[in-house]
């Protein structure tokens, strides 16, 4: 059995370009999450995040608009299929809105992953963009 999670996250006074770069630039991704990431903004390329805990491929990229990736956690069962992670970026006036869908998640990992997106990405991003010290939760 699998599960799909959806999230809508609003970043006040933020251009979508800044959010796209936080995710797709390896140095920025690593800086804000506090964990090594290897990622490039090239379709078809492999990536890893959180020191190899997450691995996958960039399936479709539209700069500042869309990221579609295959995504798999290191602790998933071998027979678990890769999940699909999608971020749609929307500029609404001065605010950026992320529309996130993470599909085909193993049920036993889905709740932790939903919480993990907030703890390891959206909250630290907001702190970083506000010029505040990023307070990270330990994995």
Image (cartoon, rainbow, N blue to C red):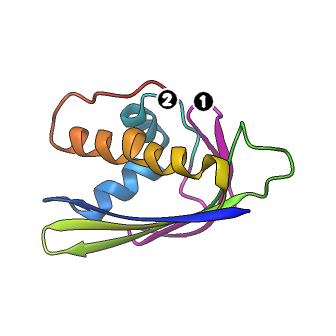
- The residue where tag 1 is placed is 51
Disc 1 and disc 2 in contact, CB within 8 angstroms: yes
Q: Nearer the viewer, residue 48 or 139?
A: 139
Q: Secondary structure at mark 1?
A: loop
Which circle marks residue 120 in the picture? none
Query: Magenta segment: does it hold 15?
Result: no
Q: Nearer the viewer, residue 74 or 3?
A: 3
- Residue 49 location in percent, x, y? 57, 39
Query: Magenta segment: does it hold 44?
Result: yes
User: Which residue shows up at 50% across the image and 27% down it?
Assistant: 139
**In the image, is 95 to the left or to the right of 36?**
left
In the rendered structure, which disc, 1 or 2, sits on the residue that comes first in sequence?
2
**In the image, is 106 to the left or to the right of 86?**
right
Q: Residues within 10 Å of mark 1 (few under 14, many from 20)?
A: few
- Residue 16 location in percent, x, y? 29, 64
Give the quadrant of residue 136: top left
Q: Nearer the viewer, residue 62 or 122?
A: 122
Kindly give the residue lying farthest to the right in the view shown.
Answer: 79
- The residue where tag 2 is placed is 35
- Residue 10 location in percent, x, y? 24, 62
Please say if 137 is above or below 129: above
* Res 102 seen here: no
């Amino acid at each position: 059995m699998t599960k799909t999670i959806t999230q809508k996250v609003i970043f006040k006074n933020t251009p979508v370009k800044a959010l796209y770069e936080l995710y797709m630039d390896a140095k920025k991704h690593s800086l804000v999450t506090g964990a090594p990431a290897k990622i490039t903004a090239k379709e078809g390329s492999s990536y890893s995040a959180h020191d190899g805990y997450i691995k996958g491929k960039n399936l479709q990229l539209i700069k500042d608009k869309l990221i579609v990736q295959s995504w798999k956690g290191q602790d998933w069962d071998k027979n678990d299929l890769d999940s699909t992670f999608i971020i749609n970026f929307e500029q609404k006036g001065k605010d950026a809105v992320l529309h996130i869908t993470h599909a085909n998640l193993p049920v036993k990992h889905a709740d932790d992953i939903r919480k993990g997106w907030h703890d390891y990405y959206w909250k630290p991003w907001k702190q970083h963009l506000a010029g505040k010290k990023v307070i990270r939760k330990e994995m």
